[in-house]
Amino acid sequence: MRIIAGEFRGRMITSPADPRVRPITGRIKKAWFGILEPHLPDARVVDLFAGSGSLGLEALSRGAAHVDFVEFSKPSLTALGANIAALGVEDRVRIRRADALRFAAKLPERAYEVAVADPPFSTDHATRLIAIFRDRPFAAILALQHRAVLELDGDDTRRYGTHALTFCHAP
């Protein structure tokens, strides 16, 4: 995987040595950040279900001021730490080892300008995350990837083959 635009364009990102990890495709990432780009300059971003940090690091590369990465898996945290160190952005990030849904449920309203999430497809985490967001919008915009067959309570959904991106906006 690589960062596709901005300050770190072309830099490689390490993936965790975990067969359950599903790296985001370049096509989806390009579409995702094409939509989010206007919201990123100087933004505080949270990357839920962060994995290797691909989404949060792309946000930093495109001008986000700070990213909080939330991940629970030890192999993913190892890869995430290595990616942050390789880019030298330790002063612009914070890693939280936590369950992403519990973390999101405890956030105050508008704690972040942008929230990105790529939860495991084999779970109901996408549905649950949107429910948490609807109850207390913890960011101005939530963007998440999920299976295209899943119908979510979002404001805008874009489908790309078997994957989809859903965007929710705080009122």
Image (cartoon, rainbow, N blue to C red):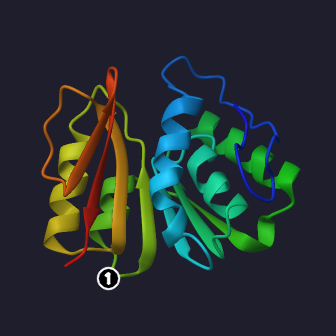
Depth order, front residue of 168/30: 30
Instruction: Kindly tell me whether residue 21 is visible in this rendering.
Output: yes
Residue 92 falls left or right of residue 105: right
Residue visible at 35% across and 82% down in the picture: 110
Q: Residues within 10 Å of mark 1 (few under 14, many from 20)?
A: few
Residue at 67% over, 30% down: 15
Q: Is residue 105 above or below residue 87?
A: below
- Name the residue furthest top: 19
Asked if residue 7 lies left or right of residue 73, the reply is right
Residue 66: percent from the left, percent from the top? 64, 73
**Image location of residue 131, percent across then percent down:** 15, 58
Q: Is residue 130 left or right of residue 109?
A: left
Q: Quadrant of residue 26?
A: top right
Give the image quarter of residue 69. Answer: bottom right
The image shows residue 50 at horizontal and vertical percentages of: 53, 48
Q: Is residue 104 above or below residue 109?
A: above
Residue 53, placed above or below residue 88 = above
Identify the residue at horizontal 18%, vertical 45% (top origin): 127
Query: What residue does disc 1 label?
Result: 108
Residue at x-position 23% and y-position 65%? 133
Quarter of the image for the N terminus: give it: top right
Visible residue check, residue 24: no
Front-lying residue, 19 or 34:
34
Q: Could you say where residue 100 lies in the image, as x and y percent from the top left? A: 39, 54
Secondary structure beneath label 1: loop
Corner quadrant of residue 78:
top right
Q: Nearer the viewer, residue 166 or 30?
A: 30
Q: Nearer the viewer, residue 130 or 73?
A: 130
Q: At label 1, which amino acid type do we have? A: Pro
